[in-house]
Amino acid sequence: MKPEKVSQDLKKSYEASEEAEKQQLWEIIKDELQEILKKYSLDFSKEQMKIFNDPIHGHIELHPLLVKITDTPQFQRLRHIKQLGGTYLVYPGASHNRFEHSLGVAYLAGRLVKILHDNQPELKITKQDFLCVQIAGLCHDLGHGPFSHVFDCLVIPEAKISYLRGLPDDIPEKWKHEQMSIQMFDDIVKSMKAENEDVLKEYGLDDKDVTFIKELIEGAKTSEWTYEGRDEEKSFLYEIVANKQNGIDVDKWDYFARDCHHLGIRNSFDHQRLLKFARVCKVNGRNHICFRDKEADNVYDMFRTRYTLHRQAYQHKICNIIEDMFSEALLQADRDLHEGKPEDMLKISEAIKTAEDYSKLTDEIFEQILSSTSDKLKESRDILNKIIRRKLPKFVGEARLTEKHISEEELTDTWKAAVEKYKPTDPTVSLNADDLPVYVVDLDHGMKDKNPIENVYFYSKRKPNEASAIKDYQLSSFLPKRFNEELVRVYYKRNDENKEEQMKKMEEAEKCFQIWCGSNFGLQ
């Protein structure tokens, strides 16, 4: 055989061998690549997504796992919890419930995670991360009681102080609905497993993911990394549903849009735009969700919207008094109207002991008290009937407190002294301080007296991977000098007098209030 022929054969053999090795190597790499793509892909096209028609976000899709959670008694209960509590009795459009808000938060949580995943693949966001954040958004409000914040902000603290019988010591005085949301979520997981449906496992979620979901609901609270659900590299995921870092989270984005829609109040904050400029940057050694510097005004509008909603709606002078009356009715009924398992005969406030008992507490308690015939509930019935018949305490006046660190007790004491000292211009009128209660209302932009923008990190177009707090000179000079205020309100609660007598007392009470404001604590 000629040497040239041998050389050609060897070359062909070598090339064939090399090609075979390349093919073999490609098969190995291809399998590994497919595994990586599968792990970090958020493609749910094969899943039977369910479409909800939402008045705020339009047609939204939810993963079948989230749909399974919505189809539980614990979640369906949210259809019977008003989003804005007693505000509905002042704003007739505010009839929306926690149910639709929770769907909206889950949807927005998914959108934000998807944007971060698509724009920054180096974050290595997985399907499990995506589902966990969405589930946390869906379940974050499971623990709300009757008329939402009325129950955990007014009823439980007072019940803890006044009716300690039976309330366990491990329930803190400042009990929050997030604690019950976690218990209710645990209850959902247990009920699914009891029905031999390990749905979480079916979609790739394990016990660590369940822990992660519960941590997301509660929100990251400390500077130290004590969380077990995810490593610190994924700290930004803890800022999506309940952001304790700066208050920018999808929970607020949904309820700002939803509440403004139903209240008829203009929403100047554009969450759709802000979503497009969200990006994760490392600041002080930790990954945070940051925003483009040109969005600073939009971010401020978010905090301003919060203030506006509290000023015009949530802390409306009539909303406040209605919710106070409702909490008083619940506290009066606490010892006599029982919820939970019949053999336990729990008081209303004791229902917070277990998720099973708590799940029976909804806004329907209002109708239960009204339709009751028990003499023991007469006082509670009378209070609720006053709300329905609009026999509410009359608003005397409001002033802004300019001095700090003055307690409500101090204000009440000085007000009582002022009423006793006051000499009515009409000798036929006498004022009683017990008929003129004082209320203090705190309003802020989300961070007490601090500028909330100071805790937000921004990146620039030129340096998208570097973020820092924005400088004062970059902000509008029209920003307020103060970011919080305290309002003092006085009401006249007697409504059993004839109209003429009531008007006379109201006039004298207003005069007394004006004198008191001019001489005490810098009231304006």
Image (tube, rainbow, N blue to C red):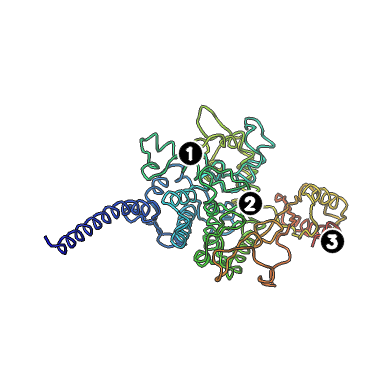
Quadrant location, the C terminus: bottom right
Query: Does label 1 or label 2 sit earlier along the sequence?
Result: 1
Residue at the disc numbered 2: 322
Quadrant location, the N terminus: bottom left
Residue 186: mark in rendering? 1
Q: Which residue lies furthest to the left in this view?
A: 1
Residue at the disc numbered 3: 518
Foreground residue, 45 or 457? 457
| 277 relative to 383 in the view: left or right | left
Q: Quadrant of residue 87?
A: bottom right
Instruction: Please say whether residue 330 is visible from this viewpoint.
Output: yes
Cα separation, mark 3 vs mark 1, equals 54 Å
Foreground residue, 253 or 274? 274
Query: Does label 3 or label 1 sit earlier along the sequence?
Result: 1
Q: Which residue is drawn at 72% across and 58% down?
A: 449
Cα separation, mark 3 vs mark 2, equals 28 Å
Foreground residue, 42 or 88? 42
